[in-house]
Image (spheres, rainbow, N blue to C red):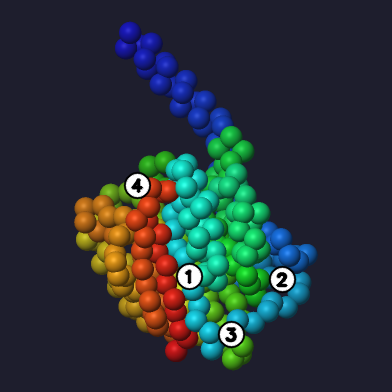
Amino acid sequence: MSVFLLMLILAVILFLYQSLTLYQPPLTQFISMNEKQSFEPFVEIDSKLSCYRPMLDAETISTTQPLKLLVWNVHKGEDKGWQSLLLNYEEKTDFMLLQEATSLQKLPQLLQRMPNQLFASGFSYRDMQSGVATLSLFSPQYYCSAAVDEPWLGIPKTGVSSVYPLDNGKFLLIINVHMINFEWTPTAYRQQLEQIMQQLEQRVDAVIIAGDFNAWNQERVEILQQKMEQFGLHEISFFPDNRLRFNDFPLDHIFVKGLKAISATTQKTKASDHNPMWVELAFD
């Protein structure tokens, strides 16, 4: 019986891996429902990032109006009600930063006020790509993606960054990230964080770094806080604060530079295993 069970387990593992495709570097797509914008690859910072710039100039973002942001791990759309929740936020949101988004959710078609989607996928399973998605009204000046492999699973954890021109001649950098989870000693976690923060060496004036940071112990929290403070970012506080916690540590965070929070809330929901964060920001 034990030999049979072992063979069965091995057969299941083999089947799963045969159905799994890994993307390293990430498979990155820009999808626009409104315009025929095309991007060409270029080298920015170093070869660890895959970067793309548009063939046409991007529209500027007003610095006199608040910037409204939704950040949410959508759990691959496996829970009932995620579509309704996103649609409820759509009218009052300029950017949606989603983690564990999938190609099967067809987000640009669902969210017609968010016609531009950046999607960086680390893997596909049975033709369903999964990764991070940034949706907005705005087309980026350029964007980059990168990934670090989960040490135990070998599946890439992805991040996508996008740079937008502001109407004052400056630039806004937005980084949407899903951090390494399955690792006890945070070696790969540090590596991924260094990869993210490297992008702040660009000429940008306002920065948003947000997503599922999987900061589930004190060591990870300290690594995260020290790195953000080093680059002059501060963390947004929420009221009420209903963020998903593990070991009493919140997993999801928003860090900003050159912006300040007007309001920041979270919402309890059964539409995912994470609760969404929503923030209204003003430029300094």
Of badges 2 and 3, the one in the foreground is 3
The percent coordinates of residue 99 (x first, y second) are 47, 55
The percent coordinates of residue 237 (x first, y second) are 31, 72
Q: Is residue 3 left or right of residue 176?
A: left
Q: CA distance from mark 1 to mark 2?
A: 23 Å
Q: Secondary structure at mark 1?
A: strand
Residue type (three-letter) at the residue carrying disc 1: Leu
Circle 1 packing at 10 Å, graded few (<14), some (14-19), many (20+), is: many
Q: Give the residue at mark 3.
A: 62
Tell me, for residue 46, which label it has, or none: none
Q: CA distance from mark 3 to mark 1?
A: 15 Å
Circle 4 packing at 10 Å, graded few (<14), some (14-19), many (20+), is: some
Query: Which residue is depicted at the point 45% across and 63% down?
Result: 71
User: Mark 2 or mark 3, which has the lower sequence index?
Assistant: 2
The percent coordinates of residue 116 (x first, y second) are 65, 64
Q: CA distance from mark 4 to mark 3?
A: 40 Å
Q: Give the residue at mark 4.
A: 182
Query: Which residue is depicted at the point 42% across and 67% down?
Result: 278
Q: In this picture, is 239 found above or below 6?
A: below
Residues 120 and 49: in front is 120
Query: Which residue is depicted at the point 45% across and 84% down?
Result: 282
Q: CA distance from mark 4 to mark 1?
A: 28 Å
Q: CA distance from mark 2 to mark 3?
A: 20 Å
User: Mark 3 or mark 1, which has the lower sequence index?
Assistant: 3
Q: Quadrant of the N terminus?
A: top left
Q: In which quadrant of the rendered view does residue 259 lie?
A: bottom left
Q: Give the residue at mark 2.
A: 54
User: Mark 1 or mark 2, which has the lower sequence index?
Assistant: 2
Q: Give the residue at mark 1.
A: 69
Q: Is residue 52 left or right of residue 1?
A: right
User: Mark 4 or mark 3, which has the lower sequence index?
Assistant: 3
Residues 85 and 102: in front is 85
